[in-house]
Image (cartoon, coloured by chain):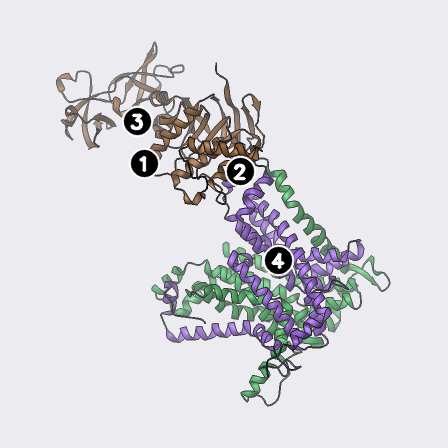
Chain colours: A purple, B brown, C green
Amino acid sequence: MSAKPTSAPSARYLNASSAVARYGMGVLITAIYVFLLAPVVIIVFTSFNPTESNTFPPTGFSLRWYGAFLESSSFIEAFKFSVWLGAIAAVGATTIGFLSSYAIVRFLGRRREAGQSLALLPVMIPHILISISLLLALTIVPFPELGGLIVGHVIICLPFTIAGITASLEGVDEQLELAAMTLGASRLRTLWEVVIPLIAPGLLSALIFAFIVSFGDVYIALFLSGPGRTTLPIEIFSYMQWESTPVVAAITTVQIMLIVTLGLVVERLVGLRKIMRV
Amino acid sequence: MSQSVLHLSGVVKRFGETLAVGPVGFEVQEGEFLTLLGPSGCGKTTTLHIVAGLLYPDQGEVRLRGREITRLDPQHRDMGLVFQNYALFPHKTVFDNVAFGLRMRKVAAGEIRERVLRMLDVVGLPGVENRQPHQLSGGQRQRVALARALVIEPSLLLLDEPLSNLDAVLRKRMRLELRDIQQRLGIATIFVTHDQDEAFEMSDRVILMNVGHIEQVATPEELYDNPTSRFAAEFIGEVNLIDGTVAGVDGGAAQVQSAIGGRYRARGDLASVRAGDEVLLMVRPERVEIEPDAAAADGLVPATVAKRVFSGDLLIFTLRTADGTELTASKPSTQRYRAIAPDSSVWIDLGECRLLPRGA
Amino acid sequence: MRAGGGLFAAALFTPITVVYLVFLLAPIGFFLMMSVFRYSPMELWQPAFTADNFVRLLSEEHYRVIIFRTLEIAALTTVFSLMLGFPLAYFLARTGSIWRGVLMFLVIAPLMTGVIVRTYGWIVLLGSEGTVNVVLMWLGVIDEPVKILETQVAVLVALVHILMPYMVFPLFSSLASQDPDVERAAATLGAGRWRIFFEVTLPLSRAGILMGSALVFTLTAGAVVTPALLGGSKVQMLGQTIYDLVLSTLNWPFASAVAFVLVFCQFSIIFLYLKGGRRRVG
C-alpha cells in the first residue's frame, strides 16, 4: 500500500539512503492507514453480523440488520429528513457561496485574503457554539426552528463551498467576462452565460460536498432538531445512548456507501483537496 | 470638418497612489485607424479600457458621437473590443462566440445566423462556425475574435495588442489583413501596441504615450521625421543624438554648434529657443552622409569607422568623431559604401537636423 | 474588476453578510453575553449583571476538573494528531506513487462520513467483545476483556482518529509547497537524514503545524458526541457540560459562562497561532 519503489525522482532520492528507514516508514504509514480506516471497515463487517452483539470477526453473514433498518420507521424518517435537509442546505450554501466567492475573487483585490478568511469563519468556531446560539436566538425571535436548522447547516457548509468555488474561479480568465460585457452582456448575464458554465464542475462539487457536510453533521442538529425534524446522525446518537445493536452498523454502512460514492464523484470532478484546503 | 467618433478630454486614472493615466485627451475621426503606441506600463491599455468602459476615469470625459459616456456600463457602449489573448468563450462554438453580442442585442435568430456567417466570411474564415475555439490555430482564433467584435457593427473597434500572441510571419500578414478589413468596413479603430512597426504600417495617426501621458500625436511619417521630445525620438527607430549649443535663430531654423565640431541647421519647436541654449541635435542613421574622399570633404567633420556591420541590404557604420562621440549611419550596401573599410578615416555630414530640448 | 462594480459587489456580498451577522455573530454574541446574567429558574435568565457564573465555574471542583480535563485531552489529541499526521502528510507530499490520489482520498473519506459513524466504529472496536479485546486475548496478552470504553483512552483514541485529517491537510499543503531540492541540497552539504528533518523540513512546515494544531485543538475542545458516547459520564468535557446545562437544567447563563471559557481557550490558541505565524515571516 505504501512506500512503493517508484519511478518518480523525489521518492527515489529520499528513499535511497537506507532500506531500514524505507521499510520503517512503510510500516508506519501502513499502520496509520489501518488506524484511519479500521473503524469504518469494521462497521461494514459488523453490519453483516448475524448476532446481536458487535463482535468481530463476524460469525456468519446475514442481512437481518438491514431488514431491521428498513422496518424501523424512525430511522427511515430520519434518513429521509437528512437527505431533504442536506439537499436544501447544499443548494443554499452553494448559491450563497458562489455569489460570495465571485465577489471575493473579482472585487476584493488586495483585501482578498482577509475576505476569504472571514468567509471561512464558521470552521474556526466550534459548531456546538453556533448551534446553541441559534437555539437561544430562536427562543427570543419568532423564527421557525426548522428554519434555524437549515440556516445552521448552510452556515457550516459555506466554508467548504467557498473554498471550492474560489479555487474554481481562479481558473476563469477575467478577460472572458470583460469580453462578454463589451459585447453587451450585463453583469448578471455574464455570470449566467460565461462564469457559471465554466465552473459548472466546481459548482456541482460544492453542491455535493455541502450535502456531505450537512449529512454528517451532529452538532447543529444536536440543539435544533426536534419532532419531525430529526436528522439521521441525531437519531443514531440518541439510539446509541441506550443500546447498541448492529442495526446502527447497517445504517451507517448505507451512509458510508452513499458518502463515499458522492465523494468519488467530487474527486472526479475537481479533486477533493481543493475543497479541503480550508 | 469631419465629425469625431470619440472624444476623450482631460482623462485621469489613478490606481491607489499611482497615476496610471493622465491627463489624456484625443479624438478619433470617422473611419480613422488610430494607434496608441508606447512601452509597457505607459497607460495605453488603461486608456483603451477607459474607452471601453471597463474602467472609469477619476477625472475627465469620454464622448461617443457627442454623447457623454464617461461612466456608462461597458454593455451599453457601442464598441467592439478584441483582447490580446482573444478571450474567446471556451465553452461555446465559433458560431455562438460570434453570435454572442447579437443575442445580447436581441437580434432575431435568422438575422443572427446570416450576419455571423457573413462576418466569418469577411474575416476569411468561412465554414468554421461549428468548431470549438480550442480546435482553431492562433491566427484563426484572432479572426474569430475580430468577427465577434465587428459583427455587432460597433461605432468604434478597439484592438488591444491583438497581434502579440502570433508568430512573426503570421503577424506580418495579419497586419495587412486587419488594415484591409478596417478600410473595407470604414470603421473607426483604436489599436494598442508597443510595436513601432505595427503602428507605422497600419495607422493613419499615432499617439505616442509614455508614463501615463501623451508625448506626441502625429502621422507615422511626422512622428518619424519630426519627434518633439527625446523620448519620441529614441522610442521610434534608431537615432543619433548629439549635444549642441544654439548659435542663433533665423527664419524657420536654428544654427547649432555641435559637440562633434560642425555647425548645423536644425528645425523644431523654436518658440522658446535662444542663442546660447544647450540643446540636442537629432539625426536618423540613414540621413548621416559619409564621405570617404578627403578632396570632397571641405567643411565636413572628420571621423573614424569604428565598426561596420553588413546586414544584407544595409551597411551599418559606427563612426567615432574626434571628441569621442559615436554616431550610427546606415547606408545601402552599394559599391560606394562597401569600399569604406573599418578603421579608415572618413568625413561626415548631418545635413539638416532636428532640434530637441536637452534633458527629458 | 473594475468599473461600476461597487454596487454589484455589495449585492453579491449581501446574502453571506446577512447570514453571518444575523444567524452567526449576533446569536453567538448574545449567548456569550448571557454569561454575566443571573439565572432564574422561572424566566431562564434575568438581565441583571453578575459575576456569579464565573465564580461558580472556577470555584467548584467539579467544573475545574472538567476544564482541566478538556484542556488535557485537547492538548494530547493535538500532540498525537501531529505525531501521526506528520509522517502521513510527509509521505503523501513526497511520494511519487501512482496511488497518491487514492491514498489522499482514503484520508479524506473517513472525514466525510461524519462524527457519528466514526465514533460508532470505535465503539465496535473497543467494546468488551470488540476487535481489540478479541485480538489481545487471542495473542494471549490478556485473559479476559479489559474495559476500554468509558475511559479517557477511548475518548482520546477516537478524537485523534476523527480530527487527524484536519492536521494532515495544512501539513500536506505546507510540505507539498516546499521545494524538495532544498532537502537534496542539505543532503549534498553532508546533513544526515535526521539533521535534514529537524533543520530543514520541520522549520519549513511551521505554518502547517501551527494551523493544523490550532484546528485540532479547537475542534477537540468543542467535542460533545464522541466523549459522550465513548467516555460516558466518566469523561465529561466542556462541550458536554454545556449540552447538559442547556438541555437538562436550562441554565443558559451558566452554560454561557462555560462556553465563554471554551471560546477563551480557543482564541488564546488562535492568538498564539497568529503570533507564531508572524514570527516566521519576520
- Residue B121: give x, y in percent of width and height: 42, 32
Q: Secondary structure at mark 1?
A: helix
Amino acid type of disc 4?
Ala
B272 is higher (above) or lower (below) than C10:
above
Q: Nearer the viewer, residue C218 or B111?
A: B111
For the point 34% across and 39% down, the residue is B167
Q: Is residue B17 left or right of residue A76?
A: left
Q: CA distance from mark 1 to mark 3?
A: 27 Å
Between disc 1 and disc 3, the foreground one is 1
Disc 3 marks which residue?
B239
- Residue A60: give x, y in percent of width and height: 59, 82
Disc 4 marks which residue?
A210
Q: Chain of mark 1?
A: B
- Labels 4 and 1 in the same subunit: no
The reply to whether the C-beta atoms of the residues labelled 4 and 2 are less than 8 Å apart is no
- Outermost residue to the top: B251
Q: CA distance from mark 2 to mark 3?
A: 43 Å
Q: Is residue A49 left or right of residue B47?
A: right
For the point 58% across and 48% down, the residue is A101
B84 is higher (above) or lower (below) than C84:
above
Q: Can residue C32 be seen by looking at this rendering?
A: no
Amino acid type of disc 3?
Val
Q: Secondary structure at mark 2?
A: helix
Q: Residues within 10 Å of mark 4 (few under 14, many from 20)?
A: many
- Residue A167: give x, y in percent of width and height: 53, 52
Q: Identify the image quadrant of residue C156.
A: bottom right
